[in-house]
Amino acid sequence: MLFVDRGLVREIAGRAGVTAALVNRYFGTKEALFREAIGTDDPTPLALADVEHEQLGQALARAILTGRPSAAYDPVMMLLRAAPNAAAQPALRDYLENTVIPPLADHLGGKDDNEARKRAALVLALAFGSIALRRILRVAPLAGQPRTASPATADDELIALAAAMVQAAVDAPT
């Protein structure tokens, strides 16, 4: 992680084709470099404005369980891997609370609506937990398994179940 050792700044600089001194000059600290790195791409798997409220659970579940990360940059995995690092946590919390949650909360009822923010945070928790089990720990059946002989594949069954769970978090309690 960026906060672990000085050698990593040299490695990052080398990959970018610059010197560590140049990285330090422009970013100052490893924390500032990390904040810039997590803010470069939107981790939202889909354009929220294009999804009807009633279909949001299905769309998010499909993105969570079938999404394939870019080989060059995977913001979700970066966030998950950095989360245990106490030095990275303030930057991550700030990013999630101010960049990721507000657009989802806005879609769920208003970014200033406390209940919508709670539901957005819950949807994010379901997503990150599912992604951690699927892509880091590779827990079956989330990590994938052979297709069953039944008409509905295991993936379709998982997506339907996850969609119901996510949709329940998306919908305002009645």
Image (cartoon, grey):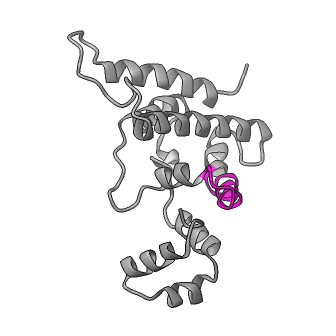
Residue drawn at x 40%, y 21% is: 158
Q: Position of residue 37 (x, y in %)?
A: 53, 68
Q: Determine whether, in the image, residue 46 is placed left or right of residue 123.
A: left
Q: Position of residue 82 (x, y in %)?
A: 57, 55
State the count of labels: 0
Image position of 88 with respect to 169: above or below: below
Helix, strand or loop: magenta stretch: helix
Q: Which residues are magenta?
A: 83-100
Residue at horizontal 65 percent and vertical 60 percent from the top:
88
**Outermost residue to the top:** 150
Residue 110 on image: x %, y %? 71, 44
In-front residue for pair 27/19: 19
Toward the left, the furthest residue is 149
Front residue of 54/85: it is 85
Q: Is residue 93 magenta?
A: yes
Q: Nearer the viewer, residue 126 or 118?
A: 126
Q: Is residue 112 above or below residue 135?
A: below
Work out whether residue 91 or residue 119 is closer to the camera in this orientation and state it: 91
The C terminus, quarter of image: top right
Q: Is residue 168 magenta?
A: no
Q: How far from the left and from the top, in percent, is residue 84?
A: 62, 49
Residue occupying the point 66% across, 46% down: 106
